[in-house]
Amino acid sequence: MKTIKHILSIILSAGVMAFTTHAVAQEAPDALVKRISQEVLDIAKSDKEIQGGNQKRVLDLVETKILPYVDFQRMTALAAGRFWREATPEQQKQLIKEFRSLLVYTYSGAISQVKDQKVEFKPMRMDPADTEVEVRSQVVQPRGGEPISLNYRLEKAGSSWKIYDVNVLGAWLVETYKGNFAAEIGKNGFDGLIKTLAEKNRTLGERAVKPVKS
């Protein structure tokens, strides 16, 4: 089975989960993703500091271009499953914070792997009244590699669209985390999950601030 980091690497290679406030309010979700995906892909390919492994540069790109347009509360609640309703508001708040940080570091570690991939989108059927949609696409690999299926779910909140789940090669990202979260909660409780994520984020954060070797 593909690892979470590998799945996210594919996602970032495609440049998905990247939006601008103006575009979200003006464009259909599939048209939005097509346009912005190319923008993010171009940045990842052309920025020499990103290609050289400058983690601060990558973190800034992830924070400004990707994360503000992801529904972390819904994503975290879905990943926590039935345990979410049993958690206190403070526990929920802490889990969202740590889950968000985990994705920041994971995305940052994957984004520098963007090379020569291209994305092809499939036609999307959407009713004007729809508030949730699924956009389907595939990542075309360089040198004739097998295309990788990539689908993602967006929800409409007011006039904007936000992503809350991604499917790569038949595996939904939330479901992958859901299994990990349930196992950790089963062993150490909800606070144990938060502590585990916090420790992992601390380690990832220390690695991210290390200077780039010339």
Image (cartoon, grey):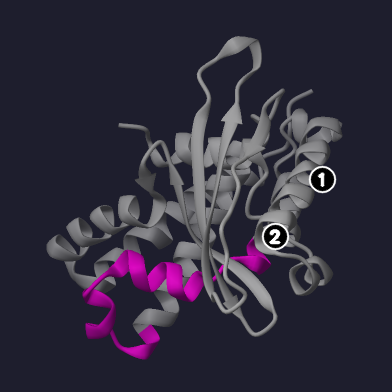
Residue in the picture at 27% in, 60% down? 181
| Residue that numbered label 1 is attached to | 39
- Where's residue 203, x and y in %? 48, 49
Q: Secondary structure at mark 2?
A: helix
**Three-letter amino acid code at disc 2?**
Glu
State the CA–CA distance, disc 1 to disc 2. 16 Å
Residue closer to the observer: 181 or 136: 136
Is residue 147 left or right of 25 when viewed as pictured?
left
User: Going by the image, does 135 lie left or right of 43?
Assistant: left
In the image, which disc is placed on residue 63? Answer: 2
Q: Compare marks 1 and 2 and give the one earlier in the sequence.
A: 1
The reply to whether the magenta stretch includes residue 29 is no
Q: Seen from this angle, which residue lies furthest bottom?
A: 89
Residue 15 x, y percent position in the rendering: 68, 44
Q: Quadrant of residue 175?
A: bottom left
Mark 1: give few (<14), some (14-19) or many (20+) Cα within 10 Å: some
Identify the residue at the far top of this view. 143
Looking at numbered disc 1 in the image, what kind of residue is underneath it?
Glu
Q: The N terminus lies in which quarter of the figure?
A: top left
- Which residue lies at the image location 35% right of the left edge and 69% below the top edge? 78
Mark 1 residue element: helix
